[in-house]
Image (tube, grey):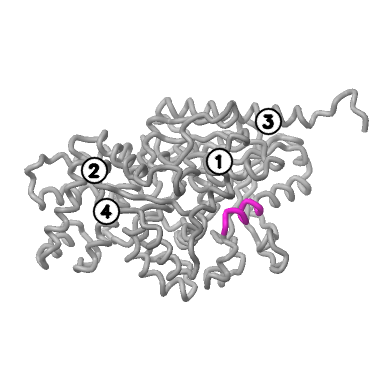
């Protein structure tokens, strides 16, 4: 998610408050939202051997699938490609769209296009309600909490189920097509939950980098930032040590007007730092380190920003100074490291601390979801991680959500509605996670049963397996994709066998 769009809430309270006015007037732009609700997903590699061609279609969806008073409808966008589809009865690979424009995910989920060619599959990319063009109330969709009330994962899953039923009933040759759900990050959570809630609709699911256990009481709140720290620790000498020290160096330097001016110049910031901006500045740096951990790919990529191969290794080359380094020397290294993320191509004249990722992700919508059912506790202690200590404070989180949206989060709801860690009754779900991905801390990283399986990619970052294949891919991700295809073929075989009429059956 993708800088899913999750993280330490308290670090984001001040900057998030800046957006209150924008939200109240119905702005759809997350202009200055600096919360730690990390966004997730997508990005392209340098090679794209399989051409992308699809139809853009729309379906009328009920605004509320679970009540009967609100009977309005809206146009849900979906993209369909039958280029490789073997009709009749060929499989359907269905992308469970997450928090952003579906065309972006379609163009950047290369694994599905490659798998479609091998499996003879149709591809459908379904846009999540309240993102991209799929706005239940048009321009008023974000105007207030009443209009946002139907932005839930449950409603989105029902949209997906209705869409698949419609395609299979109206598209010639699709009636008996087995459907496999695929998604990454929040989309991966949705694909897993889709199989759990609608096993009559999808025969299996690939949940890539899906933190379905990043909820209260399921994993330690510090696990996410600990994983980020481990990525930097193994990527360069003293790298995480110096990032940990940098926070106090920032406090020291920013204590004077001349120090603030020096930081502004050294980091090439677009706007001069003021005393009130120091917390936002540190939040910006923290999110930068997190984003780098998510996109630590083995080749040049344009995920959240254009980056070199193994970007953390490149970043850490600027952070090798010893313990006696002065505050300014240390922060000069930090500034050079940060510019690897924000100015790798050399095209940025200055850096804006209100921006850390692509604009294709719906940060405001995800912000609302995190304030209702997607409560993902995170904390840091400065010992097991390289960040400033910050406790998880649910009450502060709830109060801020209430002030922004007039709603309060239900901290236990995800466990109630999706089963938490008690999911052994389900079947045919692959949970893939990268060892470099901080979201793996909240993911399923062990086999639960013969058909609830975990694939761990030790040198993989955030859903590396869903990206286009590359000559630079590590062997572990190639093996992961091959195993995923093997499971797909078995699920398709099982589905076709179940639909095959028995010779002695009586109709």
- Residue under the point 78% across and 47% down: 169
First in sequence: mark 3 vs mark 1: 1
In the image, which disc is placed on residue 51? Answer: 1
- Residue under the point 30% across and 51% down: 288
Q: CA distance from mark 4 to mark 1?
A: 37 Å
Per the rendered image, the range of residues in magenta is 152-159
Q: CA distance from mark 4 to mark 2?
A: 18 Å
Q: Would residue 471 be counted in the magenta stretch?
A: no
Residue corresponding to mark 2 = 383
Q: Give percent across and percent down for residue 97.
A: 56, 50
Q: Quadrant of residue 448?
A: top right
Tell us which disc is closer to us: 3 or 1.
3
First in sequence: mark 2 vs mark 3: 2
Residue corresponding to mark 4 = 285
Q: Nearer the viewer, residue 368 or 377?
A: 377
For residue 467, side relative to residue 178 (left or right): left
Q: Would residue 154 be counted in the magenta stretch?
A: yes
Label 1 crowd bin: few (<14), some (14–19), many (20+), radius 10 Å: few
């Amino acid at each position: 998610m993708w800088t899913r769009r999750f993280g330490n809430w308290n670090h984001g309270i001040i900057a998030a408050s800046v957006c209150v006015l924008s939200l109240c007037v119905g702005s759809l732009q997350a202009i200055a939202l600096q919360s730690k609700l990390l966004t997730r997903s997508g990005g392209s590699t340098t090679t794209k051997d399989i051409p992308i061609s699809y139809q853009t279609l729309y379906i009328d969806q009920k605004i509320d699938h679970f009540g009967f008073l609100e009977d309005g409808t809206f146009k849900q966008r979906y993209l369909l490609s039958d280029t490789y589809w073997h009709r009749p009865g060929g499989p359907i690979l269905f992308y469970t769209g997450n928090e952003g424009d579906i065309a972006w995910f379609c163009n950047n989920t290369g694994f599905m296009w490659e798998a479609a060619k091998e499996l003879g599959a149709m591809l459908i990319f379904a846009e999540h309600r309240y993102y991209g063009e799929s706005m239940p109330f048009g321009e008023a969709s974000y105007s207030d909490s009443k209009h946002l009330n139907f932005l839930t994962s449950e409603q989105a899953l029902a949209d997906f189920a209705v869409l698949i039923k419609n395609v299979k009933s109206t598209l010639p040759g699709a009636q008996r097509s087995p459907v496999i759900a695929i998604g990454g990050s929040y989309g991966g959570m949705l694909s897993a939950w889709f199989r759990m809630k609608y096993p009559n609709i999808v025969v299996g699911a690939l949940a890539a980098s899906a933190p379905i256990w990043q909820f209260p009481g399921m994993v330690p709140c510090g696990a996410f930032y600990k994983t980020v720290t481990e990525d930097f620790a193994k990527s360069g000498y003293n790298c995480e040590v110096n990032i940990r020290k940098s926070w106090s160096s920032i406090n020291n330097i920013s204590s004077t007007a001349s120090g603030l001016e020096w930081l502004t110049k050294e980091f090439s910031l677009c706007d001069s730092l003021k005393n009130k901006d120091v917390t936002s500045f540190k939040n910006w740096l923290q999110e930068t380190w997190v984003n780098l951990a998510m996109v630590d790919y083995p080749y040049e990529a344009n995920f959240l920003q254009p980056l070199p191969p193994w970007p953390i290794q490149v970043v850490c080359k600027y952070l090798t100074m010893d313990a006696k380094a002065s505050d300014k020397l240390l922060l000069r290294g930090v500034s050079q490291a940060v510019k690897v993320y924000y100015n790798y191509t050399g095209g940025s004249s200055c850096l804006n601390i209100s921006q850390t990722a692509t604009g294709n992700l719906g940060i405001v919508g995800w912000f609302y979801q995190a304030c209702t059912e997607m409560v993902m506790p995170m904390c840091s202690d400065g010992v097991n991680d390289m960040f400033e200590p910050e406790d998880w404070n649910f009450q502060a989180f709830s109060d801020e959500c209430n002030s922004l949206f007039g709603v309060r989060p239900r901290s236990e709801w995800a466990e109630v509605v999706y089963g938490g860690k008690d999911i052994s009754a389900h079947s045919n779900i692959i949970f893939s996670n990268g060892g470099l991905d901080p979201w793996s801390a909240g993911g399923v990283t062990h086999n639960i049963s013969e058909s609830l399986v975990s694939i761990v990619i030790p040198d993989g970052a955030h859903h590396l397996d869903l990206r286009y294949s590359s000559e630079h891919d590590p062997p572990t991700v190639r093996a992961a994709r091959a195993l995923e295809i093997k499971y797909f073929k078995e699920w398709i075989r099982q589905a076709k066998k179940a639909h095959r009429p028995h010779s002695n059956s009586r109709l």
